Structure formats: structure tokens, C-alpha cells
Image: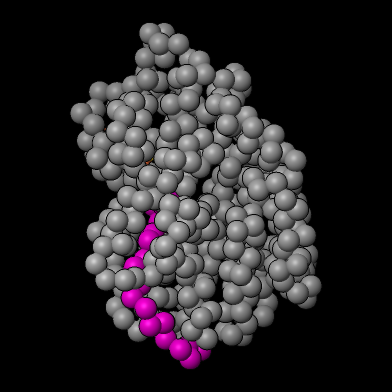
Amino acid sequence: MLKRFHKEIDYCTYCPKLCRFSCPVGNASSNETFTPWGRQTLLHLIGQGAVGWDRATANTVYKCTTCMLCREFCDHEIEVPPVMHAARNEAVRQKIQPQEVVEFHHFFREQQNPFGDDLAARLRSTLPASLFNADAQVVYFPGCSLIYNYPQTIKNTFKVLEAMDVNYVACYDAETPCCGIPLYDTGYLDDFKKNAEVLGKKLGRAKVIITGCPSCAWALKARLPEVGVQLTERIYHLTEFLAPLVEEGKLPVRRPFARRVIYHDPCYLGRYLGVFEQPRKLLNEVCREPLIEFSWKEKHSYCCGGGGAIPTTNPVMTREIARERLHEVNDGEKKTLVTACPTCMRSFQKADERVDVMDLVDVLARCL
Ligand code: SF4
Ligand code: SF4
């Protein structure tokens, strides 16, 4: 099993756990099996036939947020998440995935999204009809999480674009609302491929795609090509799209943001897409006070706990990981936690309802 990953599995198995301290799942669970070393060693033993590959052991490969933080502390730059994704797909193929994952899959299939609602209808009630245009060349893809959890952030995105005189961006109609990453993360690669093929037809003509969700950006850019669906190469997270326009002085800042801000780099925006500078540029443009940084920031940013389907398989762990991240926010002076990802927003809000957390585009909209 997983022969193509023998290098990754062997390196971790014989490693003195050099990245152990960084793994949010290992830290939150205090369980050595749920560390990069532990999970890879288990796969090594399964490969040797010393341990069985069954529902109990398959459960272990779902204990990774796919945050990629361990790679940053690995001398060999080993990437653990691709191994976990492949093992999850194997678990699904052999029908030994966790029960929560089976239930999630049934739920997803009903409405083609993880929230079980008609998200296209929700989106239509969020934005005016004039913002939808199936033939547009520059398309905003909101993604299911923003539509379901943060419709105001979508409204604010168009408010900011309008204030900058950017009137050529149309909104995707969300008839297939999800980028498919929840299917990929849970191991349903065949379903992910089907979803990707529909997206390929719907978004195939767009020359530029913008999204406010880092996971969607990564899925459209890197995961769809894995299953043979190639969209435009010009796929941007909203912060990447806005930063150069703001540098040109196009954002009319009428009321600078007065609260102290601490910025959280989302794993998929930072470590996966390499976007560190642009969100900071945008915040520095509108914040009256200098930005506060986490001690674990940029490529070493700590995970919110919301990735890798952990909220589906182990919501308590998501909460624990998010709380770990929030210690620095709740320490000392009062601050607003700003991020640029609906999954991070959700994880932090669920972990501590008192925390003042905002999406970056909501901050920009407030300053107009
Ligand atoms: S990812 Fe690198 S540092 Fe971490 S256990 Fe594997 S080989 Fe060791
Ligand atoms: S990707 Fe993140 S959660 Fe997964 S093993 Fe590495 S540090 Fe742990």
C-alpha cells in the first residue's frame, strides 16, 4: 500500500521526530500516534504487514489538518499531507473510512456541498442579479463556506471592488458551489473528480478567477489539474488581486481602522499559495496602528484546526487547536484578529465566541 510514498514514510519512521513540536494535532491530542512520525510509522508497519489496515488504523490518517507546518521544520522537506490524502483515498476504496466521514459524504451528495443547503439560491439572495454574468472573463468564485457562513463578506467584496472602480468582476452563480476540497480531504477522489469536471465546464471560459477562500484558490489552481481539469492559470486569492490595486492608490480610505490588529496567516494562503505580503500590505494601508504579529507567523503560522476535514472527524480537536492559537490574541491588550479565510474565521469563532475576529475584506469595507 502507498508504495509511491515509501520515501516519505521511511524518512518519518526513522526520524527522531524533529518536527514533532510543531504538529497541531500531536500537540492538541498529546498522542504520539497522531504526530507526523506516529502516523507514518503506522503506515510503515501496515506496509510490512506487522499491523492490519482496518477501520481503527485508517482512523489515524484522518488525524492531520494538512497544515504543512511540519515540512517547515523538516531537513528533508518531507510533505506529510499528500501521504495522508492517498491513505484516506485508500480507506474510502476499501470502505474502512471513519463513520463520520461516511455520514459527511451522504450529506454532501444531497446538495453538492458540505452545508446541505441550496447555496446558489442563498447567493442569489445575497447579491443583485446584475453581478452575475455567465460569460464574464473575470469571475469571483465565493466558495461554499463564504456563501453559507459569511454572505456579508461576499457583499463587502463587491463593495470594495466598486469603491476601487473595478466593475468588470462578475460573480459565479454557484450552481456547483463547492471547489470539492472537502471531498478531497475525506478521500472521495472519484467524487472530487466529478465535481471538478462540472467546475471545469462552468469556469472554463474565465480568464481570471478570484476567490476569498484560500482552500478554493488552492483547489482550483492545484487540485483540479491532478484530476485532469485545467482552468486558467490566473487564479488569485482576493488579497493577491487587491494588493496591487491598493498600491496604485485605488482604495479610497475615508475612516482608518482604529483597533489594534493581529493578522493570522491561513495555512493554505501562506504555506500552500505563498501569499504572505499582500494581506499585510492591505492592512497597513487601512490600519491606524502598526500591525501586531503572532510569534508563529508567515511560513511558521500555526493552524486554526479547521483543515483536513478535522471539523468533520474530530470537532473537539479543532476547538483545542484554535484555542492554542488564540492564546496570543487573548493575552495583554485587546486586539482584533484578522484573517483572510472563512475556515479560519469559523474555527476561531467556534473556539471562543468572545474573540473579535474579522475577515480582511470586511476590515477594508469598513474603512470606505
Ligand atoms: S516530516 Fe521530516 S522532521 Fe517530521 S517526522 Fe517526517 S522526516 Fe522527521
Ligand atoms: S500537516 Fe500539520 S497536522 Fe499534518 S502532520 Fe504536519 S504538522 Fe501535523
Position above or below: 128 against 52: below
Provide the residue span drawn in magenta: 250-272
Image location of residue 206, percent across then percent down: 69, 62
- Decide: is 315 above or below 356: above
Q: Is residue 172 or residue 343 the one in the foreground?
A: 343
Up/down of 35 relative to 234, above or below: above
Q: Residue 102: horizontal and vertical position, in percent?
A: 63, 29
In depth, the one of 161 and 202 nearer the eye is 161
* Res 120 → quadrant: bottom right
Horizontal side of 22 relative to 60 (left or right) equals left
Q: Residue 188: percent from the left, percent from the top?
A: 62, 33
What kind of secondary structure does the magenta stretch mostly adopt?
Answer: loop
Residue nearer the viewer, 169 or 131: 131
- In this rendering, position of residue 208 left or right of residue 367: right
Residue 55 is left or right of residue 13, and the answer is right
Q: Place residue 151 in its image quadrant.
A: bottom right
Question: Camera-side residue: 267 or 287?
Answer: 287
Residue at the image position 47 percent from the left and 47 percent from the top: 306
Residue at position x 75%, y 67% from top?
125
Task: Give the residue at the far top of this rendering.
Answer: 50
